[in-house]
Each structure stands twice: as structure tokens, then as C-alpha cells.
Image (tube, rainbow, N blue to C red):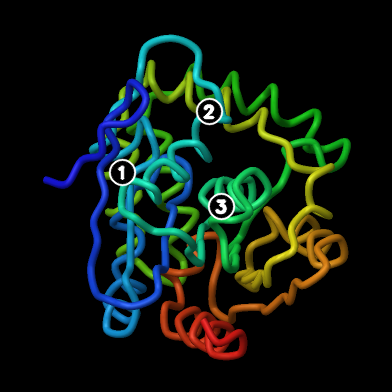
Amino acid sequence: MPVYKGREVDLYYEVKGEGKPLVFTHGASWNHKQWRPQVDAFSRRYQTVVWDIRGHGASSLPHGKVDSEDFSKDLADLLSELGIEQATLCGLSLGGHISLQTAVRYSEKVAALILIGTPFTNAFNWFERMFVPVNRLTSYLMPMSLSGKIQGRMLSKYNKSNQAYIEQAFGSIAHSDWIRIWDAVTRMDSTHDLHKIRCPVLLLQGESDTMIRRQQAYMQEQIANAQLKIIRNAHHATNLDNPGEVNEAIASFLSEHAI
């Protein structure tokens, strides 16, 4: 089992294929298995890398308060460990935000960004500012199995197999770890860093994903070299809901920028 022993953390990863590096980062409470449709498609021409964020899947979580800055540090360290000087980063939701922050903090390592259903803050408007404390409390009180069932049911409208995957991923995380992870995730904020991103950026949004619609539109305005594409028949689990259209959009973007 490939594991990178980083700063007090063991990070699970998988590498497949050869070519220019394409690195995928999963969403909160999920794991590297989210990206199977993309690895199957792109490992034929690219070196694909998937990994488990600390506290998720087969990666460990150090004791104490979780610092969200460690997420992008982990990704940058993993790239160095694999001898990757520069990569295209693709992430969904939290994975997109980690990819975005990596492009800000380690810009020399990032050739391009593909951000799927990605937020850049949890305080975009008054509703989010009011909802986040309630969401943290709910995460504290609700068992992981119930959280997984609720999210799985909500995000399996277009792909019924999403439910089993989401429930399994949720169930692999200890509740005490999830409370620490989610507290850190909901405090991430890149509002004042968007203008620092200079690489090409592709924003992909599921047509039914209202969770991040306003934030994605705002990023398109604030990031100099960003384009936004709507993915049909898809919600927040966009790459699983409609992998064909997502893969086509990614391939077109990579070809357009000669990546």
C-alpha cells in the first residue's frame, strides 16, 4: 500500500499511467475512490495521482486541533515526494478548495486548476454565516452513519451507486476525527486570494448543484484566466453523476492549454 510519511501524518496515494501529472483531490468525508471514472479515462495519457486527505480513507490524522493549512502543505509535500515539479490539480468541493489554496501558496507547483463544485469560503453571504455554526453543531450531534445516509440519499439522484459509496466513505471516519476535520474545513477562506491565481482555471458546476452556484460564478469573475462550464444531469457529486461530460470538459481544457 503506497503511503507517504509526511509531517506527523501518513498519506495514502495511488499513481497510475505516464505523462504529464494530473492530481485529483476528493471532497470532505469522501476518499480517493471518488475519482475512479477519471483515473480510468486519463491514466491512458497522463500520470494520474489520487490520494486521501488527512483523516480520510486510509490516511491518518494526528492528535489535536486540525489546521486547514496542513491540507495544502500535505498536497505540496506529496508532489515533492513523487518528484512532480508541476501538475494540473483537479478537486471537488473541499478538494477543489485545497487545490485552489495550493495554487496560491505553492504557485510554482501548479500548471492549471480544475475546480468542480468548489467553494472558496464558508461566509459568502449572510445565510452561510448563520448556517455554518448550526452545521458544526449538527456534525457534533449526528452519528456518522446517519450523516452518510442523508448525504448519500441527497446526492444519488443521478447515479444511484453514489449512495453506497458515500455511506461507506462516511463510515470509515471516526466521529471524533470528523468533528475536528469539519471544524477546520468550515474555517477555510480564500476570499482575498482569488486574484493571486494566474494559471488557467476550469470551473465545473453540476446544473443542480445550488450549494456552490454563487461562489463559482464569483470565482469566474475574480480569477483572471477562469472559464465556467455547466455539467448536465449532475448535482454536487458532479464527477460521479455525469463522468462522461466531466471527462470531456477536462480533456478539452487540457488540450486547449496544451497540457
- The answer to whether residue 221 is above or below residue 43 is above
- The answer to whether residue 27 is above or below residue 172 is below
The reply, left or right, for residue 241 in relation to residue 67 is left
Tag shown at residue 208: none
Q: Secondary structure at mark 2?
A: helix
Kindly identify the residue that appears in the image at 79 percent across and 53 percent down: 196
Kindly identify the residue that appears in the image at 49 percent across and 87 percent down: 248
Judged by depth in the image, the label closer to the viewer, 1 or 3, is 3
Gap in angstroms between the C-alphas marked 1 and 2: 15 Å
The reply, left or right, for residue 26 in relation to residue 111 is left
Gap in angstroms between the C-alphas marked 1 and 3: 21 Å
Classify 10 Å Cα crowding around label 2: few (below 14), some (14-19), many (20 and above).
some
The disc, 3 or 2, on the residue closer to the chain's N-terminal end is 3
| Residue 155 rendering spot, x and y as whole percentages | 47, 58
Q: Which residue is mark 3?
A: 99
The disc, 1 or 2, on the residue closer to the chain's N-terminal end is 1
The disc, 1 or 3, on the residue closer to the chain's N-terminal end is 3
The image quarter containing residue 195 is bottom right
Q: Which residue is mark 1?
A: 169
- The answer to whether residue 54 is above or below residue 27 is above
| Residue 142 rendering spot, x and y as whole percentages | 45, 23
Q: Which residue is mark 2?
A: 182
Q: Are marks 1 and 2 in contact (CB under 8 Å)?
A: no
Q: Secondary structure at mark 3?
A: helix
Classify 10 Å Cα crowding around label 3: few (below 14), some (14-19), many (20 and above).
many
The reply, left or right, for residue 98 in relation to residue 35 is right
| Residue 88 rendering spot, x and y as whole percentages | 51, 67
